[in-house]
Amino acid sequence: MANVQVLIFVESRYKVNRKKIKEAISDVLDTKGVTSSCEVSLAFVGDRKMHALNKKFRGFDKTTNILSFPLSEGYQTPLPSDKLRLGDIIISYPQVIKEAAAEEVMVDDRIDLLVRHGLLHLLGEHH
């Protein structure tokens, strides 16, 4: 079982189940056999911020539900090597609300699915 540190930033008006998020991350890491200490960060943002991130980093002039930024890609910054830093997962909370309503699922369940999807991207799995 991996010792995982989960850093979560949530814009104040959004409600997330931090415990469920951490459980989802631990579950994926266990399933993938990750046993080393690691860190992952999550941010829940609005559509304007997500749109800006998509435009800046992907060249897409639109919002999406999720973005993943593995630390193994892009700019390299020297970091202490006491743990594996997997990267950042950014989720658009308004998109989660829309998708949960359309799919008739709980918001927490939609977040769980997206967190798992984003973490798999950070671990190197792609569509």
Image (cartoon, rainbow, N blue to C red):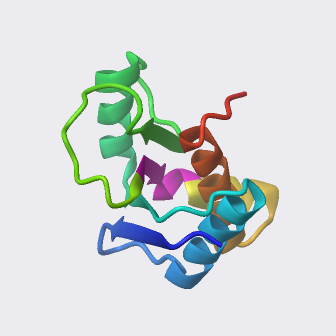
Quarter of the figure with the C terminus: top right
Please identify the quarter of the rendering in which residue 17 is found: bottom right
Residue at left 23%, top 54%?
80
Q: Classify 23 as above or below 11.
A: below
Q: Classify 108 as above or below 121.
A: below
Per the picture, the main secondary structure of the magenta-coloured stretch is strand
Q: How many marks?
A: 0
Q: What is the x, y in percent for residue 93?
A: 48, 59
58 horizontally vs 125: left or right? left
- Residue furthest out toward the top: 59
28 horizontally vs 8: left or right? right
Q: What is the x, y in percent for residue 28?
A: 70, 60
Q: Classify 5 as above or below 48.
A: below
Q: Which of 7 and 106 lies nearest the eye of the viewer?
A: 7
Query: Which residues are the magenta region?
Result: 85-95
Q: Which of 46 and 77 lies nearest the eye of the viewer?
A: 77
Residue at left 67%, top 34%?
125
Q: What is the x, y in percent for residue 124?
A: 61, 34
Q: What is the x, y in percent for residue 16?
A: 50, 76
Residue at left 80%, top 64%?
104
Q: Classify 33 as above or below 88.
A: below
Quarter of the figure with the N terminus: bottom right
Q: Is residue 34 magenta?
A: no
Q: Is residue 90 magenta?
A: yes
88 horizontally vs 17: left or right? left
